[in-house]
Image (cartoon, rainbow, N blue to C red):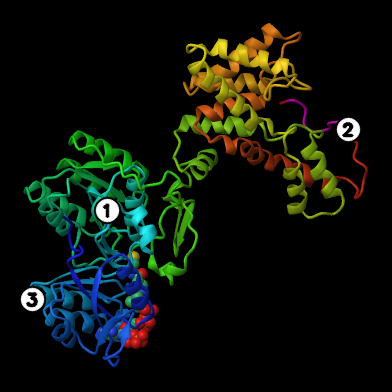
């Protein structure tokens, strides 16, 4: 089962000949929704997307018969007459997509709906979708991608943020967890079907075993949901996340309804009430899939693993129709960041909430992996970046950047030249070393009865026989690189050292046993081991050196431009340090 929409519902679109009405009718139909009629005054007798258009809702109902839902795509000032017309014609569910519908109009619509036993989702809603059964509004985009992002399963979703509604469904799907129905209740202060009404419906839906609720500060929706649970009106597990933790009193948090007034609608108040009634609260949106899986497994209903979810599924879904005027024309996706007016999110987190809370290194980890790291991981990354920031005036990237700068090249060009000089033999050993470490770890398990030492010794012997150098070992200047020692110490202290560190240590020991002169782990080798232990994908290994080196290159280029004459011949080593003495 599902709530609000499934394949049996007969749907009308008001404003069907408008820009959004037409596009969304095509997409809703493409997903399998039964769109049986449309209404635009003055356009009766025509067709839109193969759907007959009528001048009034009554005419439509007379002609096509039963209509269960009307989806309204008319501009905000015209919503009230359109909604009243649908309600008076006997339609029992409206989905009011437009934003900025005047609040007094919504109150009038609510009064009429109550009088006629009707309900409405929104206003300012992305809509509602029941996977593989039907969609109303602007959720999901094209059918092919919507079927990847929204998969059927035991979870009901109710959310006050449109973007987060679809993102939650997407990230749950990536975990193999599907949904009965995914609903965006709307972002306004007065809406037709707030969370508590959604919970009542999910309670009645026998396929829904758990509900995930995304709340926000402002209004009493979450408190009302808690009261419903307290009164026994909702008895299933509830996983809840409340946005707006950092919002100050009186500041609107993105959506019109998300504002704390006096002591009402605070983050703390909502969290406390929901916890009191036994909901499982998650602090961060990113934790929702894991916690949902845990709660589901406690219900002894293993999340259904759906085979059509490809591991390399494209990316977070497009989330808000405002920014996809012609969704069917969109042809690429991104999961890195999402920007709406006054809202910037990195991997789902609001940038302004990350600022001052996550260090730059932690944020880099988040940007690259999509996961928020612990403070300990952040410290280790900081140490790696500091270790690689600058290595004197002789490395090829520095010389190349300085040479370009001395020709008068602008900053961006000189920096680019420096970065382009980071290659296999300079700054590029990290990735190769990560691959080698993976090989040692893999063979330790498969061929050497779990012995890292035996696996490392065999690899060193093989490399020696082939006269190949081991990436990440030895240095042309340092015999006991202080950076390596410090990085490995920190990894040990923070207990983040894993099989990567064990493997480089085993390789170092094997090299000492088999070689004529010792070849200690160098900073690339230490970074390779640590990046593996921090679950960084191998193909990103060298980029950590590049990220670290940019500030050093900026300093070198700046000095070249401000201190040296143009077009000088730069000798790699004929220079003297005249900066601050050791301090
Ligand atoms: C509602 C909205 C989608 C309409 O935008 P639009 O498609 O660009 O508007 P258009 O003017 O092209 O179309 C509106 C149509 O409704 C028709 N209309 C007006 N009053 C009507 C009524 N009472 N009944 C039926 N149709 C009506 C208009 O005649 C027009 O059709 P036309 O093509 O014949 O001119 C837009 O105003 C809006 O609010 N967008 C934001 C939605 C949003 O972000 N929601 C929240 C998601 S989180």
State the residue position of label 1. Answer: 215
Corner quadrant of residue 373: top left
Taking depth in this image into account, of 115 and 379 the one nearest to the observer is 115
**From the viewer's perspective, is 582 left or right of 568?**
left
| Above or below, comparing residue 483 to residue 388 in the picture | above
Q: Classify 10 Å Cα crowding around label 2: few (below 14), some (14-19), many (20 and above).
A: few
Distance of label 2 from label 3 (alpha carbons) = 87 Å
Note whether 529 is above or below 17 in the view shown. above
Residue located at (12% from left, 74% from top): 113
In primary-sequence order, the first of circles 3 and 1 is 3
At 8% from the left and 72% from the top, the residue drawn is 117
Magenta residues?
572-582
- Which quadrant is the N terminus positioned in? bottom left
The residue drawn where x is 31% and y is 69% is: 28
User: How far is the residue under mark 3 from the one under mark 1?
Assistant: 29 Å
Report which residue position mark 3 lands on. 116
Q: Can you tell which mark lies on residue 182? A: none
Question: Is residue 489 something one can see in this rendering?
Answer: no
Nearer to us: label 2 or label 3: 3
* Label annotation for residue 575: 2
Say which label, 2 or 1, has the lower sequence index.
1
Q: Quadrant of ligand 1?
A: bottom left
Helix or strand or loop: what does disc 3 sit on?
helix
Q: Residue at x 76, y 53 (%)?
A: 413
Residue 268 locus on image (x, y percent): 26, 46
Q: Which is nearer the eye, 417 or 145?
A: 145
Query: Visible in this render: residue 537?
Result: yes
SS for dot 2: loop
Magenta stretch containing residue 577, yes or no?
Answer: yes
């Amino acid at each position: 089962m599902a709530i609000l929409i499934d394949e049996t519902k007969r749907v009308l679109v008001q404003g069907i000949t408008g820009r959004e009405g037409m596009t969304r009718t095509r997409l809703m139909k493409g997903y399998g929704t039964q769109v049986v009629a449309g209404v635009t005054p003055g356009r009766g007798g025509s067709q839109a997307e193969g759907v007959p258009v009528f001048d009034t809702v009554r005419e439509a109902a007379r002609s096509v018969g039963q209509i269960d839902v009307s989806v309204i795509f008319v501009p905000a000032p015209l919503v009230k007459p359109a909604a009243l017309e649908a309600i008076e014609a006997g339609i029992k569910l409206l989905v009011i997509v437009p934003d900025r519908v005047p609040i007094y109009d919504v109150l009038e619509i609510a009064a009429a709906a109550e009088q006629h036993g009707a309900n409405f989702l929104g206003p300012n809603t992305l809509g509602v979708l029941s996977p593989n059964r039907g969609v109303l509004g602007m959720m999901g985009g094209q059918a092919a991608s919507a079927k990847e992002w929204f998969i059927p399963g035991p979870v009901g979703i109710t959310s006050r943020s449109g973007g987060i509604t679809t993102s939650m469904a997407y990230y749950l799907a990536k975990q193999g967890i599907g949904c009965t129905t995914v609903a965006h209740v709307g972002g306004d202060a007065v809406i037709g079907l707030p969370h508590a009404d959604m919970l009542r419906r999910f309670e009645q839906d026998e396929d829904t075993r758990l509900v995930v609720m995304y709340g926000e500060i402002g209004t009493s929706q979450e408190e009302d949901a808690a009261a419903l649970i307290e009164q026994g009106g909702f008895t299933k597990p509830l996983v809840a996340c409340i946005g707006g933790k950092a919002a100050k009193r009186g500041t609107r948090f993105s959506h019109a309804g998300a504002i704390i007034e006096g002591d009402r609608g605070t983050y703390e108040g909502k969290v406390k009430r929901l916890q009191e009634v036994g909901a499982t609260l998650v602090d961060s949106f990113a934790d929702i899939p894991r916690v949902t899986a845990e709660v589901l497994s406690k219900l002894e209903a293993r999340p259904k693993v759906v085979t059509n979810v490809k591991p390399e599924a494209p990316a977070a879904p497009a989330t808000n129709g405002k920014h996809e005027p012609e969704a069917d024309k969109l042809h690429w996706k991104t999961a890195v960041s999402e920007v709406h007016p006054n809202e910037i999110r990195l991997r789902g987190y609001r940038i302004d909430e990350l600022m001052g809370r996550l260090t730059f290194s932690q944020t880099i980890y988040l940007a690259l992996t999509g996961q928020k790291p612990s403070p300990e991981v952040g410290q280790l990354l900081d140490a790696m970046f500091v270790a690689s920031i600058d290595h004197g005036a002789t490395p090829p990237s520095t010389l190349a950047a300085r040479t370009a700068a001395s020709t008068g090249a602008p900053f961006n060009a000189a920096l680019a030249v420096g970065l382009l000089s980071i290659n296999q033999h300079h700054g590029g050993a990290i990735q190769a070393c990560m691959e080698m470490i993976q090989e040692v770890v893999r063979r330790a398990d498969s061929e050497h009865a779990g012995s890292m030492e035996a696996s490392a010794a065999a690899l060193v012997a093989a490399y020696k026989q082939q006269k190949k150098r081991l990436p990440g070992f030895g240095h042309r200047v340092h015999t006991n690189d202080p950076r390596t020692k410090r990085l490995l110490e920190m990894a040990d202290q923070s207990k983040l050292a894993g099989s990567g560190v064990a493997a480089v240590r085993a390789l170092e020991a094997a090299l000492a046993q088999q070689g004529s002169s010792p070849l200690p782990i160098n900073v690339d080798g230490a970074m390779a081991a640590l990046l593996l232990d921090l679950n960084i994908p191998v193909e990103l290994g060298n980029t950590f050196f590049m990220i670290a080196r940019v500030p050093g290159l900026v300093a070198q280029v700046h000095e070249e431009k401000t201190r040296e004459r143009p077009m000088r011949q730069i000798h790699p080593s004929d220079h003297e340090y005249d900066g601050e003495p050791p301090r």
